[in-house]
Amino acid sequence: NGTGGNGEEGGDELITVGFAQTGSESGWRSANTESMKEAFSKENGFDLKFNAADNKQEAQIAAVRSFINQGVDAIVIAPITVDGWDDVLTEAKDAGIPVILEDRTVSASEDLYASWVGLDFEQEGKTAGEWAVENADGSNLVILEGTTGSSAALDRATGFGAAIEGSDITTLDSQTGDFTRDGGKKVMEGFLQKYGDDINLLFAHNDDMGLGALDAIKAAGLTPGKDITIVTIDAVKDGMTALANGEFNFIVECNPLLGEKAADLVKAVLAGEDVEKKTIVPDQSFTQEQAAEVLDSRPY
Ligand code: AHR
């Protein structure tokens, strides 16, 4: 393998990188995978081994183990859940293979990975919650949570909860829809059966679950964006379209374009350079009017 050889600087050797992706649960994930594949291309000096784990942590850990056994130069992980990484990260360290995390975080010791690049999920939740208090105080709220045990779901819940604390928003229910459209639809159907039109505010931890919920809301004879105020996170094309159309009311962005930064980190770590332990990529947020203005220029 390339043992850190830099394909860009004239050598023929490519840097072999194993990338353990979560799966393909959402539009955000597709955009993230594309960004990673583009950045870790042959033209950029990489030989990428890609694995998507269908949102199952055991499968993701097995993929990382297989990358270690293949003797790749570096491993990149988008960890499905926060816990459970200590053993396999220790194995990578013992094998002398640096690990870079992208997107979500882990609870394992920082000594077990070289660097992380991702988003401030807690701030995303806080921004969503602050908008809800300002624009829908006094509402009855239901929440569609992301994958249980993921840093994206945990931190967004923390940020949102802190922002609505002390407001007159009443939380009727909160359940996981696993970041998928199907999950969002099914859980929202259950909420509507149980609480009917008492619900007038929905916070979905991502656009896809909010988009799934739109079907359930319409099937119940309600108008999304009017009868139920909808706040989501991601700002992918379909979510921004729903926002511009008035079916969503507010979206906090979660930027999936992390590939270039992750590739730079891999090269720097293999070159023995000191790198930042954490890199946070900034997010924006959008109202309906702002979504209509930027919709055509969004890259994903
Ligand atoms: O970890 C980022 C989250 O994972 C995105 O918000 C969600 O859409 C994705 O599945």
Image (tube, rainbow, N blue to C red):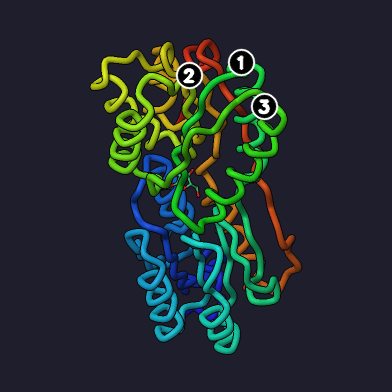
Cα gap from disc 1 to disc 2, whole angstroms: 9 Å
Cβ of disc 3 within 8 Å of ligand 1? no
- Tally of numbered discs: 3
With 186 as the anchor, is 293 left or right in this view?
right
Asked if residue 150 is positioned above or below residue 195 in the image, the reply reads: below
Cβ of disc 2 within 8 Å of ligand 1? no
Q: Inspect this view and state whether residue 136 appears.
A: yes
Disc 2: CA contacts within 10 A as few (<14), some (14-19) or many (>=20) = many
Of marks 1 and 2, which one's residue comes earlier in the chain? 1
Residue type highlighted by circle 2? Thr
Asked if residue 86 is positioned above or below residue 243 in the image, the reply reads: below
Dot 1: element: helix
Q: Which mark is residue 263?
A: none
Q: Are marks 1 and 2 in contact (CB under 8 Å)?
A: yes
To which residue does mark 3 refer? 130
In-front residue for pair 98/292: 292
The percent coordinates of residue 74 (x first, y second) are 53, 73
Identify the residue shown where x is 41% and y is 43%.
31
Identify the residue shown where x is 38% and y is 73%.
58
Of marks 1 and 3, which one's residue comes earlier in the chain? 3
Disc 3: CA contacts within 10 A as few (<14), some (14-19) or many (>=20) = many
To which residue does mark 2 refer? 229
Residue type highlighted by circle 1? Asn
Of marks 3 and 2, which one's residue comes earlier in the chain? 3
Q: Inspect this view and state whether residue 296 appears.
A: no
With 244 as the anchor, is 122 left or right in this view?
right
Please identify the quadrant where the N terminus is shown.
Answer: bottom left
Cα gap from disc 1 to disc 3, whole angstroms: 9 Å
Dot 2: element: strand
In-front residue for pair 267/278: 278
To which residue does mark 1 refer? 135
